[in-house]
């Protein structure tokens, strides 16, 4: 079987996401590029199952909003909110299978997003699930990919259901709302 040569693509990425990717790649004993490729493959496959572009856009937007709210809340708990104006992003070159890149570009175009923004969304949502995967030293990469696939697929399905529910009920439950409900009960 002929091995497909990967395409080198440069994307803009948030330094915090890059730090998390580096941390998990090191724990899993794989390259950052391989981890990114795996996360993009899984994320794209899950998004591709969802045929409604509106739900996809809503899901990506809600997750970004939830992340910003969580960051503000964590800063409020510490009484300090640090915003580093110098952290504008980093250009990162990654190796991606050309077919996957074509699919990602096509879907990003349908969603009216740039390649970099769409990839950043995919990575941002997918790495949230990595913290739940146990990395016991040197691991079998096939098991890692299977575990990644299961966890991240499950997370995307939950996010899409949450977005569909929000659309149906015309109401978005945020982390602030969830915290208020817990305190009132």
Image: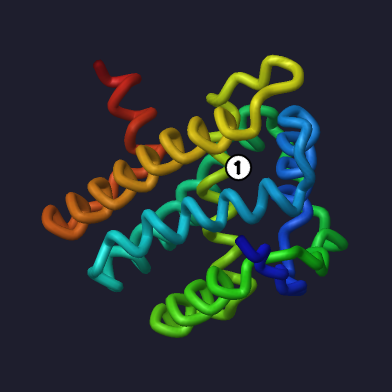
Is 172 placed left or right of 98 in the picture?
A: left
Residue that extends furthest to the front in the rendered view of this protein: 1
Badge 1: residue crowd in 10 Å (few <14, some 14–19, many ≥20): few
User: What element does badge 1 sit on?
Assistant: helix
Name above or below for residue 20 compared with residue 133: below
Quarter of the figure with the C terminus = top left
Q: Residue at the location (71% across, 68% down)? A: 6
Q: Position of residue 105 (x, y in %)?
A: 53, 79
Q: Quadrant of residue 184?
A: top left
Residue hosting label 1: 71
Q: Position of residue 129 (x, y in %)?
A: 52, 35
Q: Residue at the location (80% across, 65% down)? A: 92
Q: Residue at the location (48% across, 51% down)? A: 42
Name above or below for residue 48 compared with residue 163: below
Q: Position of residue 169 (x, y in %)?
A: 13, 53
Is 135 placed left or right of 94 in the picture?
A: left
């Amino acid at each position: 079987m002929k091995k497909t040569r990967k395409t080198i693509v440069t994307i803009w990425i948030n330094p915090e996401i890059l730090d998390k990717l580096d941390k998990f790649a090191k724990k899993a004993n794989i390259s950052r590029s391989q981890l990114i490729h795996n996360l993009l493959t899984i994320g794209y496959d899950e998004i591709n199952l969802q045929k409604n572009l509106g739900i996809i856009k809503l899901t990506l937007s809600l997750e970004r909003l939830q992340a910003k709210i969580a960051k503000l809340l964590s800063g409020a708990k510490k009484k300090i909110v640090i915003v580093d104006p110098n952290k504008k992003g980093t250009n990162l070159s990654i190796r991606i299978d050309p077919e996957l890149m074509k699919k990602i570009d096509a879907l990003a175009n349908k969603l009216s997003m740039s390649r970099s923004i769409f990839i950043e969304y995919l990575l941002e949502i997918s790495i949230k699930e990595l913290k739940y995967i146990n990395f016991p030293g040197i691991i079998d990469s096939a098991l890692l990919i299977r575990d990644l696939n299961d966890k991240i697929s499950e997370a995307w399905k939950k996010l899409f259901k949450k977005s569909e529910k929000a659309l149906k009920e015309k109401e978005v439950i945020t982390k602030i709302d969830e915290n208020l409900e817990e305190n009132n009960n």
